[in-house]
Amino acid sequence: MATGLTAARARPAYWAQARRHLARSDPTLAAIMRRHPRVAITSRGDAFHTLVRSIVGQQISVKAADAIWGRLHGTCVQMTPDALLRRRAATLRRCGLSDRKVEYLRDLARHFASGRVEPARLAAMPDEEVITCLTDIRGIGRWTAEMFLIFNLMRPDVLPLDDLGLLKAVSRHYFDGDPVEELLARAGRARVATLGQRWAPYRSVATWYLWRSLDPVPVEY
């Protein structure tokens, strides 16, 4: 079931309850949350905007993604499917996008412009159906779809097991700081998934605070 925001860019209605649940179930998370008492996840509210920003940020640093996003947004101030499709591929490449990401963004825009992807329908779908729908778009894999679930639809119980930041934080706080590669070789993602069972039904919130333990500045999509 979708869980929305009480107001634009407000914290989710479930946030306080999630904090209480996580504090009771996991002393490690309780300590992390105490260090970040006045921050919470927020949503920009626009599905297309969120997915564009997610594609821009794939496989590059946050700093590089922010720079490219700034140039892209300067070129396409109204970040809508039609506006993006009106931009020439060469114009998009000059923002710092690779040829492949230009293709991905144009395919995403066509899905929205044609109605093949409708935000209202996505909001009504269960998590796995949203993932199935979005991964039909070129350039969107499970990780990007999970970021959409967390940051746009504000779903409370998503555990992105392919997210490097989450794996680094889990390794640091629960597995003696082993390198992520060693953690995965020794324990595998199944071990991380088992650990995450104690956080349900608020695994998105646990993930968000584990990210904060590595970088106190919240990332938005």
Image: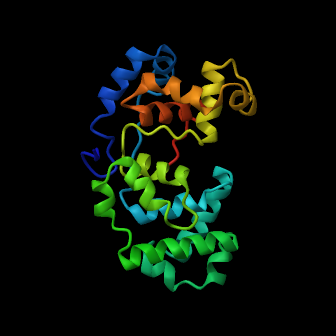
Q: How many marks?
A: 0
Residue at image location 67% in from the left, 76% down from the top: 93
Q: Is residue 64 shown to the viewer in this render?
A: yes
Q: Quadrant of residue 12?
A: top left
Name the spot of residue 16 as percent of width and height, x first: 31, 28
Quarter of the image with the N terminus is: top left
Q: Nearer the viewer, residue 188 or 143?
A: 188
Residue at image location 55% in from the left, 56% down from the top: 141
182 in relation to 136, above or below: above
Residue located farthest toward the left when viewing the structure as drawn: 6
Q: Quadrant of residue 171?
A: top right
Q: Nearer the viewer, residue 120 or 75?
A: 120
| Image-based side of 82 in relation to 28, left or right | left
13 in relation to 136, above or below: above
Name the spot of residue 94 as percent of width and height, x first: 68, 76
Q: Is residue 39 shown to the viewer in this render?
A: no
| Image-based side of 39 in relation to 125, left or right | right
Residue at image location 48% in from the left, 37% down from the top: 159
Residue at image location 39% in from the left, 37% down from the top: 157
209 in relation to 82, above or below: above
| Image-based side of 80 in relation to 104, left or right | left
Name the spot of residue 6 as percent of width and height, x first: 24, 45
101 in relation to 41, above or below: below
Name the spot of residue 207 as percent of width and height, x first: 50, 34
Type of colouring: rainbow
Q: Quadrant of residue 188?
A: top right
